[in-house]
Amino acid sequence: MPSFDEVLKEAGGFGRFQKRVFFLLCQTGITFSSLFASVVFLGQAPDDYWCRIPGAAELSERCGWTLEEERNFTVLPLRLGNGSSSGECERLDISWDAPVSCTSPLTCYGNCSTGNLQLTTCQDNWVYKKPHSSIVSEYDLVCGDAWMLDFSQAILNLGFLVGAFTLGYAADRYGRILIYLLSCLGDGICGTIVAFAPNFTVFLIFRFLQGMFGKGTWMTGYVIVTEIVGSDQRIVGIVIQIFFTLGIMILPGIAYLVPTWQGIQLAISLPNFLFLLYYWVVPESPRWLLTRKKGEKALKIMHSIAKHNGKYLSPHYSQITISNKEVSNPSFLDLVRTPQMRRNTLILMYAWFASALIYQGLVMRLGIVGGNLYLDFFISGAVELPAALLILVTIDRIGRRLPFAISNIVAGIACLITAFLPEDIPWLKMTVATLGRLGITMAFAKATFPSLNCWFICLVTPLKYLSPFFFCRNFGVSLCSSLCDLGGIIAPSLLFRLAAIWLELPLIIFSILAVVCGILVLLLPETKGISLPETVEDVEQLSSHFGKCGKKRKRQDTNSYI
């Protein structure tokens, strides 16, 4: 009885059918990355705002003032009398309940002269020059409530974390394409509600849900792609990363053309409804059907794939087998029971955490450093494209361990140098920062795309397996992925709170995390050119010899070399 990989090879491992499905599902990467980085534009700090004195709105209407005139009469005296206050977070401790002069509204208060100003903290009633340009002006996330912007991004990442576990489990149980379509529907609906949220609480609730469903679309789309291509087509992981990068590059263009945050939110959410059309063109994963004992449906799909690819399946392919060991689920103890496995597990957990924290921190930092945000964001996204190409060039020629370590160390050194470069050399500061972004992008891709990294195979494979989807749904990668999302939860608060102390302080922290990660990665075994380990003992032997995992074992049913 033929194995699934034998049938897939006969039907075409990466033919026209797979390329079409692959291209369609890769579009999910564009919408997901836009959601991932959208806070940079949704949460732009307002250009000009001030705190309105109680009664000033009525007085302004009675006197026929423009906003600029109202500001000159009510905020300018505050600045003149107290140079330490700009009128953004403090206001004059007065209230215009009695009639006052339209030309000199402050003269009626003896204690309000510019030489003896009484101030109080502003609690509400801010006035914005562009009131609906961002969620900051929409929900008054300024002054003492500025931390809520950090919190909104942390909530999104919490949604990613919950979605990875809940929808990942649901996709294993109820089917890949079903959960993908439901996730697209949920992403679109929740994203639309976010755009019209009447208050910040509703915004946070549906931002969390959008994050959860968004992670479902990205994760299940990736799984479907890897399950319908041959086991030797590892390039798909890199190409999916390129589509993720395209989303990063497109986002500033959308933000530049759309003047309101609601428009930006709708632009990145509504395309999810178009993905529902995939119901008619993307089939269920035949690998998943086999794990659910639905061999006839799987074989029918394989015949359809072969037909679209111009191939023909032999009549003796009446049944397909899949090893029971493939669907075994190892426990956490399998990851820490033996010394080498335990060391690899802890290093990779830290690598996922650090890479995600630094990557998201550098993305969000663009929103607070000044300059041309749209151009800088585009350039920082474009630099991720050569990062993907460098991975392609180095992964098979040099190996996995050394490029992973070097990319982290380069990112760390670049962050450190950027922190101490003078502001009057912006081109040099931008160049070095871009180099850091290039390095952490390579590290992030190598750490978080299992199809690029055999260490996860070593980590989570106590039993023999054949298909690339196995480690995607394995507990070991889920565990590391949770650390990735945890890094994303911490990144906003770490960035914004430390930047409030010193703008470059986050870069120092990022530098330390990246360099430590690069050094730790050197302790991992190199896996270039060796066969896939089949047992925990193989992993221990692989780690002990750094690249010589026993004898190279050929297997008839899969591409056995990495």
Image (cartoon, rainbow, N blue to C red):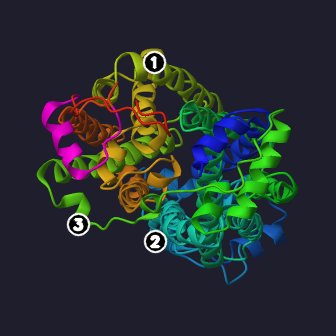
On residue 333, the disc is 3
In the image, what residue occupies the spot 48% across and 54% down? 470
Disc 1/disc 3 C-alpha distance (Å): 45 Å
Relative placement, left or right, of 403 versus 444 is left
Q: Considering depth in this image, is 288 or 119 the residue closer to the camera?
A: 288
The quadrant holding residue 11 is top right
Pick the front one: 372 or 485: 485
Q: Secondary structure at mark 1?
A: helix
Residue 388 lies left or right of residue 218; in this view the side is left
- Distance of mark 3 from mark 2, alpha carbons? 54 Å
Secondary structure, mark 3, is: helix
What amino acid type is highlighted by mark number 2? Thr
Q: Nearer the viewer, mark 3 or mark 2?
A: 3
Q: Which residue was labeled with disc 2?
A: 121
* Residue depicted at x 85% and y 63%: 64
- Secondary element under disc 2, as helix, strand or loop, is strand
